[in-house]
Structure formats: C-alpha cells, structure tokens
Image: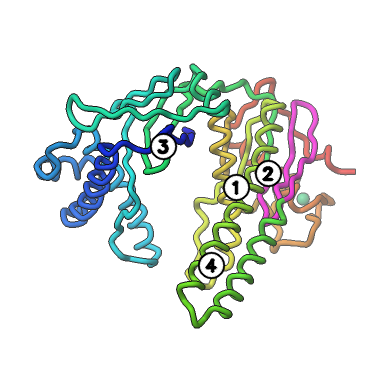
Amino acid sequence: MKGVVFHLESDLPPEAKFLLEDFRLAVNNAIRAAIGLRVTSRNALCKLAYRDFRQDFPRMYAQHLLSAFEVAASVLKNHRRRLRNRVDARIPYIRRLMMKAENQAYKLDRKSGIIALPIRARCHVELKLLISQYHRKYLDDTGLALGSLTVLPDRVIVAFRKDVPLAYVTESVLSIDTNEGSLDGVLAHRNEAEVVRTNFAEVAIIQQRHHDRRKRLQKKKAHDRHTSRRLCKREGRREHHRVEYRMHQVADSVISLAQKHKSVIVLEDFKGMKYKKNKDLNRRLSMWPRRKLHQIIEYKAAWRGIPVVKVDPRYSSRKCPICGRIQDSRMGAVFECECGWHLDRHINASINLLQTAISKGLEVAGGLRFDPGAFQH
Ligand SMILES: [Zn+2]
C-alpha cells in the first residue's frame, strides 16, 4: 500500500467542506461512544452505535459513516497504546478536518483524474486532481489497484495497492545485522559469499545534535513557553525529515542489492525485546532508528515482492557459528572463539542470523551451501 498525495485544481467545494466537518464530528462522537460502550473494534462499534449515528447524521452517505467508525477505531488503538505506556491519557480528539473513504465509496477516473465523491445518496461532488508525471506513473500502472481515499482541506491522498507482488525465486540470502549506526551483513550465493555494509552513523549524530539544540532552546526561552514550544516543534520536524531521508537512502541500498541478486532478506526480529521502564529508556531511544529502518525496509520489500524473513536475534552476537559455543559477554570489534574462529563482531552476528534462518527452514533456489570458513583468512 502506498499513499500518493495529490493537490486539487481548485478549492474544495463547500459541500465537500461540510462533509469533512460532518466526518470529523462523526469520528469524535464515535471515539466517545466506543469508550462509553467499552468496545474496541470497528465491528462492535458499528453493531452498537450505527442506529444512533444514522439518526445523528441522517444525510451522511452510509459508507462514510462506516469509515468514520474505522478511523475512530484506529485512533483508539493508538490511544490504548499510549495509555499502556502511560503517556498523555486524555481522550483523543481529532482537530484537523479530514475524511476517509474506502475504495468502494468513491470513484476515480484514472485518465482524467476526476474523483466522484458521494456526499449522500444520489449526490456527489467532483474533485479534479492536479496530475504530474510522478502521479501519472501510479495512475497508468494497471498493476496497481485503488485503495482508500483521504480528503484533507488542501489535498487528497490516494492509496495504491499492488495486487500481486512479483515475487521472484530467490537465488541468494542477504542477512543483515542491524546496529546502532550501521547495517552489517553477508550476501550469500550458492557457492560464495561477500560482506556488505552500509553506514548511517549520522542518524545518531543528527538526533544528538537536535536533542542538544532543543535543550538549549528550552533554557533560552524558559520565560516564553509558547515560543519555546513552537521552536522545539520546528526543530523536531527538521530532525524528523533529515533522519527519515537518510533512512530511506539506506533502505533503498538494501532493497536494490536484494533485487539485483534475487535475495531473500534476513533481519533480526526486535519484537520480543522488552525493556524495563526508565532504566532502559536510553536503550529504547537508541533502538528507535533500528526499528524504524526495519519498518522501511519491510515496507519497501513488500511493495517490490522481495521476501523478508525475521529471526530471533538471541545469542546472535555471542555465538560462534563454527563450534556453537556461546561467549559469556560481548567482546570488542572482533569476535574470537576458543576454537580459533575470529571475525568482525557484526559480520559474525549476521552469519548467525543466516544460520538461524537456514535451520528454521529458509530455502533458496539452487540450494545454499553456506560455509562461514570462506570469511577466514
Ligand atoms: Zn568456536
């Protein structure tokens, strides 16, 4: 699923603006109704509240009402997560004007770029999209189906879905150990393997720099909380853009390598990792770029039909891939074992991930006789 942003040729017609207002109200009411009724899913909410909502919003197109329940359910899901993490427990309220329509609730003529958006039964407005070459690529691609439509006051977002990703028969494995400032791994072919690396050390540097700058701003503008908050927010946005940009570059390099060699990508599964509150806060923060990077890689891989396998990273940094011995503690830059095996610590970890994946049944066309010994000089 990929969201593509379109601007409109002219301002939103008044009927559409009213629809956005109604939709926002319906979402906010649905959020409160769900909390009152103690339900969490869209379906449960629909069952219990639909009749009332039909009366409160007699003019709204039924599909839009269902979509409002859907949006409310997803807002509440985030809310529950925040409650679990004990941050900002206020009941959410959607402020910005928006509406979301599922793909059966609107029509988009892909040639002319005209959206027919129903307002109520037998009444719709037309929105004319501004189309650039970039947009044409998506509109003309017959392999892409239309997903949901999100309407905002100044733009719309159309989701495109690839019906069947062109999954290839894998010929190699790209096993990656994700570290604080780098991806280190091996690309293993049938009979040979090579070390691959990419570095994103600057992400941590950007984060640190912005963190310091924010702290300074807060101190300097301590007398003026409003300005301080505004500046910090701007600072946060800049940081976000820079970090995101770099991460996409790194993910792209992984994806293009995998595509070129028809690889299956092996990554660590961070899911099981749990941290104690506060004590491990720093560790959690430093994990953020890695999780984010995985998210981007997985998303891009899915879009291109590149298979991704995630494996339990336990002991991957402490195990010897030759004799299986597990070292007591992490070591320096080089992993060394009593059996004589020694290798760059990160590359060693990626070999362990690869072996875990193979032992869990990962198969590669043509077979993979991976011999770690190839890395020993
Ligand atoms: Zn060993």
Q: Provide the residue span drawn in magenta.
A: 177-199
Q: CA distance from mark 3 to mark 1?
A: 27 Å
Residue type beneath disc 2: Val
* Neighbours of disc 3 within 10 Å: few (<14), some (14-19), many (20+): many
Q: Residue at x 57, y 37 (%)?
A: 309
Q: Residue furthest front?
A: 10
Residue 135: x, y in percent?
Answer: 52, 28
Is residue 197 a member of the stretch shown in magenta? Answer: yes
* Neighbours of disc 4 within 10 Å: few (<14), some (14-19), many (20+): many
| Local SS, label 2 | helix
**Residue marked by disc 3:** 156
Left or right: where 128 falls relative to 167: left
* Neighbours of disc 1 within 10 Å: few (<14), some (14-19), many (20+): some
Is the C-beta separation of discs 2 and 3 under 8 Å? no
Is the C-beta separation of discs 3 and 1 under 8 Å? no
| Local SS, label 3 | strand
Residue type beneath disc 3: Val
Task: Give the mark, 3 or 1, whose residue is nearer the N terminus.
Answer: 3
| Local SS, label 4 | helix
Is the C-beta separation of discs 2 and 1 under 8 Å? yes
Q: Residue at x 75, y 47 (%)?
A: 347
Q: Nearer the viewer, mark 3 or mark 1?
A: 3
Residue type beneath disc 1: Leu
Q: CA distance from mark 2 to mark 1?
A: 8 Å
**Residue marked by disc 2:** 250
Q: Total number of numbered labels?
A: 4
